Every structure is written in structure tokens, then in C-alpha cells.
Image (cartoon, rainbow, N blue to C red):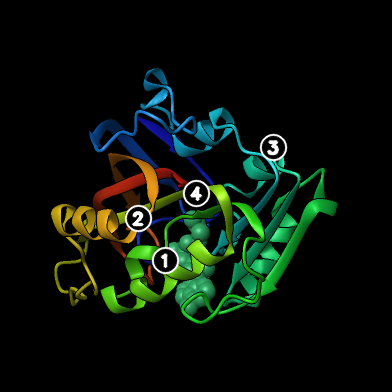
Amino acid sequence: MTTSAKPGCICGQKSSHLPHQNRGDKINARPSGTAPFLLHPQNLNTPLDWRISELPLKGEWLNLAAGDGRYTQELLDKVDSLTAVDIDGVALKKLKAHVSGRDTVLKTQIADITKKLPFQDHSFDGVLCTGSLHLFSKSVLRKIFPEIHRVLKQSGKFVIDFAVDIKRQYQNPTAGAKKIKPNYTLRSAKALLETLLKDYNIQMYTSEFADDVSNIEEFGFITKGKFILVVGEKR
Ligand SMILES: C[S@@+](CC[C@H](N)C(=O)[O-])C[C@H]1O[C@@H](n2cnc3c(N)ncnc32)[C@H](O)[C@@H]1O
């Protein structure tokens, strides 16, 4: 098991600085025989930031719903330019504070990813979106994905994750368990992603995660679940 004390988490909170764990990845769907943009099977058990280091990322990248900066440094270390977008300007300020080194290639922009993205067609070589897509309903995702498609160049790459089967264990039994909405199952999310990504060569993996915020009074729970990681290339 690996733990990374990175900014951000997948548990459905807004941006945070909580530890994030994942483990036990395996290939489980539609590996593409043709896409060169694939992860080496030997490295499936590594956390995503290591895999980002492995992936052949270059050119101009867009980080959608970037939050306060998880994976930003790993991306910046590889790509030529990175545009980080979020609806929350405070999170973007924190993101800027978290990175070091090549910050001249980092741009931040406040934008709502459920609306038309403020970029021209075919602007980016790649799009990363982590910890966020599972927060949106199917009908909203059907607006977000075409926008990703529009701003990606031909043969553009993407790396996304999607949390599923999320459960919260409250440490204080009297705490009112809040329903997590939407909460996709692994099966429904895979089917949805397959449909939304029909114009891409994709590779999907599943992992588990656990975010322990039980010692923080305002939260007081452990969130557990699975997530799907998808890497792909626009056909
Ligand atoms: C759980 S955080 C994930 C942040 C980061 N990508 C990560 O992996 O840690 C979800 C992020 O989505 C952003 N967000 C939520 N709704 C959004 C929207 N409509 N447009 C842009 N960003 C949004 C939040 O502000 C928050 O930063």
C-alpha cells in the first residue's frame, strides 16, 4: 500500500490537504492494442504520481478541476505548459504556492467545467482530471466530455479518474451519515465511461482508496471506495 500526503483527495470533498491512499490496481477493461500511450504493466501498483512520471506526457496540458494542486508538480516536471482550471480561485492560489521550479509554464484560470471551456478547439496535447468527475451527474458529464474532446488536439491524451462505490464510516455513531450523491457503482461508471470515450483508445484500471479524516472534527469519517483510472488517446 502506498500513501501520499498530497494536496487534494478523491473523497468528494472540495480541495483539501488530506492523505490519500490507493492500492491493488489491475487492468480490467478494453486495453487498446494500438495506443502507444499506455502504462507498463509492471507499474500498475504504483500511485498515480509515479505513473504520471512514467507516461510520455509532453506539450500543452490542461488540468481540469485542478483544486489545490495534486499532481501539478509531476505534470509540470514533464510538460511544456500547464493550464490549471478550477471554479475555486482560492484553491488555484494554493496550487500556485505548492509548485516549484518551472512555474513560468503554469497558468491558472477560474472556470466552470460544466460550461463551455474558455479555450479554442484543439488547444491541448493532453487533459488531466482527477478526483472530480464522479461529483457530476450523468447529464452534466455528457456536457463535460464533449468539451474535453473539443479542446484536445488530434491524438491528444487524457488521464482521468473516477471514484465509485463510495462509503463513509462515521467514527461517532451519532453523526448523521450524509448520503453521497451521485454515487456511481463500478459497473455503471465503467459503462458510462466506455460510452463517453468511444472516440478514444483507452485503458482502464481499478484501484481502491481510503481517505481517513476521522480525527478532524468537522469531518469525523473515513471514506473508502474504488476508483477507475483511465488513460487514453483521441483517435
Ligand atoms: C475533490 S477536488 C479534486 C481536486 C484535484 N483535481 C485533485 O485531484 O486533488 C474537486 C475540485 O473540483 C472543483 N470543482 C467542482 N465543481 C467545479 C466546476 N463546476 N468547475 C470547475 N471546478 C469545479 C472544486 O473546486 C475542487 O477543487
**Residue in the foreground of this view, choosing between 25 and 211:** 25
Measure the C-alpha gap from mark 4 to mark 3.
Answer: 14 Å
Q: Classify residue 96 by image quadrant.
A: bottom right
Q: Earlier in the sequence, mark 4 or mark 3?
A: 3
**Residue in the foreground of this view, choosing between 119 and 87:** 119
In this rendering, the label closer to the viewer, 3 or 2: 2
**In the image, what residue type sits under mark 2?**
Leu
Determine whether the residue tagged by mark 3 lies in a helix, strand or loop.
loop
Q: Which residue is mark 2?
A: 197
| Residue for point 46% across, 55% down | 130
Q: Earlier in the sequence, mark 3 or mark 1?
A: 3
**In the image, what residue type sits under mark 4?**
Phe
**In the image, what residue type sits under mark 3?**
Lys
Q: Earlier in the sequence, mark 3 or mark 2?
A: 3
Q: Which mark is residue 158?
A: 4
Q: Which residue is mark 3?
A: 78
Q: Earlier in the sequence, mark 4 or mark 2?
A: 4
Q: Is residue 100 above or below residue 88?
A: above
Q: Which residue is mark 1?
A: 145
Q: Classify residue 97 by image quadrant.
A: bottom right
